């Protein structure tokens, strides 16, 4: 059991590391050289870098470390060890990237193409981090402090701050960069929400059949899942039937659907997408 726990922790931190480095690559290669500001710490870093001699990566490191310090002071352990790890790794990765692979201009001459990558790579990484109970720190720590000590609407407050940071790009750089940044700010949250939903997507089966035993055995022995069964009666035919309820991943869902269609073609199936399953074998167990 202890070995399994260690392996689970190692797996979790391996995923956190890959997601964080993927985020750092998107920020450093596509966001910083184009001066895109989507809010947050990296957005502030881009603005500060433009009006001073320090790089955006250096400002990201300084701000994130300062915010982590405030997090420990005001929140204690509530800051979250995963968030501390991700925030530190992101800051260090960006600082090292500037020394190992300096970039003084955008990678390509296609700002729209680079905007897509500047939005998508950090957004997908954020979705993975959020799904594992972590974040990249930064303004999330400010939100946690505000939530603890004030009655502010945190989501609205952070959105206003991000919007102000993004609008500043119009004045610090140019209107084109500002409009690209505004587009990135609005699209980023949509991609994060959609990615989280798809990461957690499961298939919920409602199966109505006359012989539930083979189906339940297939679910238990082949798919390794559980199910709930109860008797029912058709309102039109008056016949006694059985209803089986079960939830599983997408690959398992295809196997179950094909098995039922082959073994009991008269069975009635309803397959529904669900992104929030909490219980044994799923999230929150």
Image (cartoon, rainbow, N blue to C red):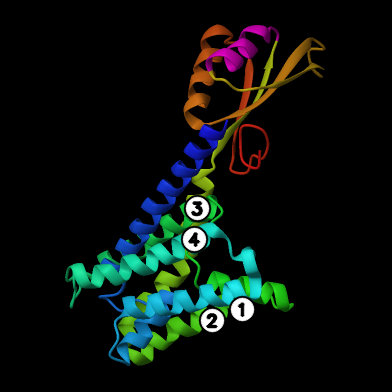
Residue 87 in picture, x, y percent from top left: 45, 65
- Magenta segment's dominant SS is helix
Whether label 2 touches label 1, CB < 8 Å: yes
Confirm whether residue 19 shows in the render.
Answer: yes
What span is in magenta? 210-222
Residue 79 is marked as none
Crowdedness of circle 1 by 10 Å Cα count: few (<14), some, many (20+)? few
Q: Mark 3 and 2 residues: CB-CB less than 8 Å, in contact?
A: no
Q: Residue furthest front?
A: 2
Quote the CA–CA distance across marks 2 and 1.
Answer: 6 Å
Residue that badge 1 annotates: 157
Residue named by callout 3:
194
Structural crowding at the residue carrying mark 3, measured as other residues with C-alpha within 10 Å and reported as few (<14), some (14–19) or many (≥20)? few
Decide whether residue 208 is among the magenta residues: no
User: Marks 3 and 2: which is nearer the front?
Assistant: 2
Q: CA distance from mark 4 to mark 3?
A: 6 Å
Residue pictured at 30% horizontal, 72% vertical:
95
The residue mark sitting in front, 3 or 1, is: 1
Question: Which mark is on residue 190?
Answer: 4
Q: Are marks 4 and 3 in contact (CB under 8 Å)?
A: yes
Task: Place residue 49 in its image quadrant.
Answer: bottom left
């Amino acid at each position: 059991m202890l070995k399994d726990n260690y392996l689970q922790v190692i797996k979790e931190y391996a995923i956190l590391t890959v997601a964080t480095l993927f985020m750092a690559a998107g920020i450093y290669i596509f966001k910083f050289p184009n001066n895109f500001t989507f809010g947050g710490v990296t957005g502030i870093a881009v603005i500060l870098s433009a009006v001073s001699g320090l790089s955006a990566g250096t400002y990201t490191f300084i701000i994130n470390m300062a915010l982590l310090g405030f997090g420990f002071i005001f929140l204690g352990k509530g800051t979250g060890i995963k968030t501390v790890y991700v925030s530190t790794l992101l800051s260090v990765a960006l600082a090292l990237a500037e020394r190992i692979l300096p970039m003084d201009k955008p990678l390509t001459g296609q700002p729209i193409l680079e905007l897509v990558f500047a939005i998508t790579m950090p957004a997908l990484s954020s979705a993975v981090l959020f799904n594992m109970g972590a974040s990249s720190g930064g303004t999330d720590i400010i939100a946690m402090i505000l939530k603890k000590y004030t009655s502010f609407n945190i989501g609205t407050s952070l959105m206003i701050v991000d919007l102000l940071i993004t609008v500043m790009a119009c004045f610090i750089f140019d209107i084109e960069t500002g409009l690209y940044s505004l587009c990135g700010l609005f699209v980023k949250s949509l991609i994060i929400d959609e990615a989280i939903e798809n990461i957690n997507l499961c298939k919920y089966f409602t199966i109505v059949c006359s012989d539930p035993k083979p189906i339940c055995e297939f679910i238990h022995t082949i798919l390794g899942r559980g199910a709930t069964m109860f008797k029912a009666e058709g309102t039109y035919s008056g016949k006694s039937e059985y209803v089986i309820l079960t939830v599983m991943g997408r690959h398992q869902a295809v196997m179950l659907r094909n098995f039922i269609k082959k073994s009991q073609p008269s069975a009635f199936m309803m397959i529904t997408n669900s992104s929030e399953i909490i219980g044994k074998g799923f999230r929150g167990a």
